[in-house]
Amino acid sequence: MKKLRIGPNLAGVIILAVVLALFGAIDIIRPFGLRFSDLSGRVVTIDTMIRIGILTIVVVGLNLLMGYAGQVSLGQAGFYALGAYASGILATLASRHGMLVGVADTWWWPWLAILIGMILTGLFAFLVGKPILRLKGNYLAMATLGLGFIISILSGQLSTLTGGYDGLTGIPRLRIGEFALWPAQRYYFLVWGAAIAVIVVALNIVHSRIGRALRAIHTNETAANTSGVDTEHYKVLALVISAMLASLAGSLYAHFQSAVSPSPFGFKASVELVTMAAVGGLSSIWGAPLGVAVMFILSNLLQSQIEAVFHIRGGEYELIIYGLVLVLIMIFMPQGAISSLGAWRRNARREKEGAA
Amino acid sequence: MLKIENLCTFYGRIQALRGVSLTIAEGEIVAVIGSNGAGKSTLLNTISGMIPSRSGRIEFDGTPVAGLRPDQIVRLGISQVPERRQIFSTMSVMDNLILGAYHRYGRGEKGAIDRDLEFVFEIFPRLRERIKQSAGTLSGGEQQMLALGRGWMAKPKLLLMDEPSLGLAPLMAREIFRVSGQLREHGTTILLVEQNARAALELADRAYVLESGRVACEGKARELASDERVQKAYLGK
């Protein structure tokens, strides 16, 4: 954890940072009146990129939990919701409830709220994780599924706190002193700055002693235990880290939308998160941004193209194709896109050497 | 070194150990033999903390062990080579061995760990040849070598070996037993659980015969090997 790894990972981080900065710069400088969305014929907008960045943070956490520690979570959207609501509730204390006036309407309060949200969500994950992580496989999946449902239902029912199914509105934009991180072109830099920082931290965790312990648990829990790895401790740790990352992402989402409601945090969201993680490659941190981007852009494309080609509203047709693509990916790239690309490259190299 | 008194272990309502008492002195190789379901593996798993005991005492170098977590017990100096090897099959041979020394990292033992790795490769040259290979691709015998090497990398005072010859060709089993004898010469005490009673009694100094969760008889390994009852039941004479 102490020093950053030099090698393909560091190179990857730098390339990603530079490319993303260039994308962001286009929308701010507007060379020849061009906008970022013009690059892709309006399919990928800055708005899309922000959403991809936010979800990347959640999926990196999910990769640590599922891909490395081998613990299934079908309730990750619940932690995502906790972060969003923590920010939503705390950041509107002054304006909605007239509480903590003078503190809760300063510029730094929302940032503190993000931190408080992460700590509370982490604490919650710790308390729930102790009993839940004794379960394995399908049972763990069911338990986390239930957890997600409970959070989703509570966020709709506790209406005095959460605004019920209408949700909370009027969540202020983030700013640093007088400098507003808005419009979206500016917020883009904050979100991706956070996402890249999260990727760097996760890469370091994976390559540390903790990462080795997590992989050991995933591969063979009994053996990890007899080798002196405190399996319970590390499983809970992985859950807490993934929950805190989901909470961070939820907060960023709340300030981006300026509103939160229960609907984007339900069971469907949890499944989509797992899908994104699987498509990118579960045991690869780099799979996270890739998986999120592929699934997000695919769904956007389907929506617009089905309408244009078949002259019908997307809806169910879109879902059919979405499902078909998923099946194909799972058949041809069961390890996820990143690992499959790596394997193809290795095979190609081997064939070349064989021919020579 | 290890002192067990009146140990009882249950799986739910089924009692697997019915008051087992056993002692091991430093430098000994002690074998526990018995038929299927006699409670041999349960005994080892209770010592290593994988299964909680219901009653009785386990004392290691004067420290009570019962109730501790497996990783704490490894840190005290008891390491287990589990039944059916339980290697990290998708990880490399090297990673498997390093994981064995998991609790020793970050304690300034880097040099000692490297020396111990070298020792494992000396006694099992085949592991050195396969150092980067993923462990699941090894043969059964090589996997057992790896499991033994991994257990030894924890630098235990007491090594618990659960059925090391299970599923191995006779020649390979003999090799594993030979190396176990070698480990003792390097200061490791060994508690060996085996169905292959003949080989176990040849290697061990003393032995216990376990029958339905109780110690049926105990004594010097050589004397047990010539005991008529043991011969009939376990040596097939």
Image (cartoon, coloured by chain):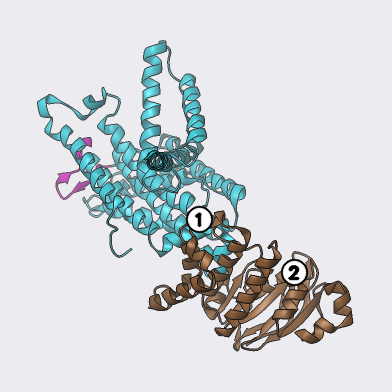
Chain colours: A cyan, B brown
Q: Is residue A180 above or below residue A323?
A: below
Q: Residue at x 59, y 80 (%)?
A: B182
The answer to whether residue B56 is seen in the rendering is: no
- On the image, which quarter does residue A341 sit in? top left
- Tell which of B135 and A191 is nearer to you: B135
- Along the viewing direction, whichever of A82 and B22 lies nearer the viewer: B22
The residue identified by callout 1 is B134
Coordinates of residue B181 in the picture (x, y in percent): 62, 80
Split into 4 quadrants, where in the image is the C terminus of chain B?
A: bottom right
Residue A173 covered by magenta stretch: yes
Q: Label 1 is found on which chain of the structure?
A: B
**Mark on residue A250?**
none
Specify the subunit that label 2 lies on: B
Front: mark 1 or 2: 1
Label 2, on which residue? Answer: B10
Q: Is residue A325 magenta?
A: no
The residue positioned 36% from the left and 20% from the top of the image is A304
Q: Which of the two discs, 1 and 2, labels the residue nearer the N terminus?
A: 2
Q: Against A238, is A147 above or below?
A: above
Q: As drawn, is B217 to the left or to the right of A252?
A: right
**Most distant residue in the front direction:** A356
Q: Which residues are magenta?
A: A172-186
In this image, B57 relative to B151: left or right? right
Badge 1 element: loop
Q: How many marks?
A: 2
Q: Is residue A141 visible?
A: yes
Q: Name the kind of residue labelled 1 in the image.
A: Ser
The residue type indicated by label 2 comes to: Phe
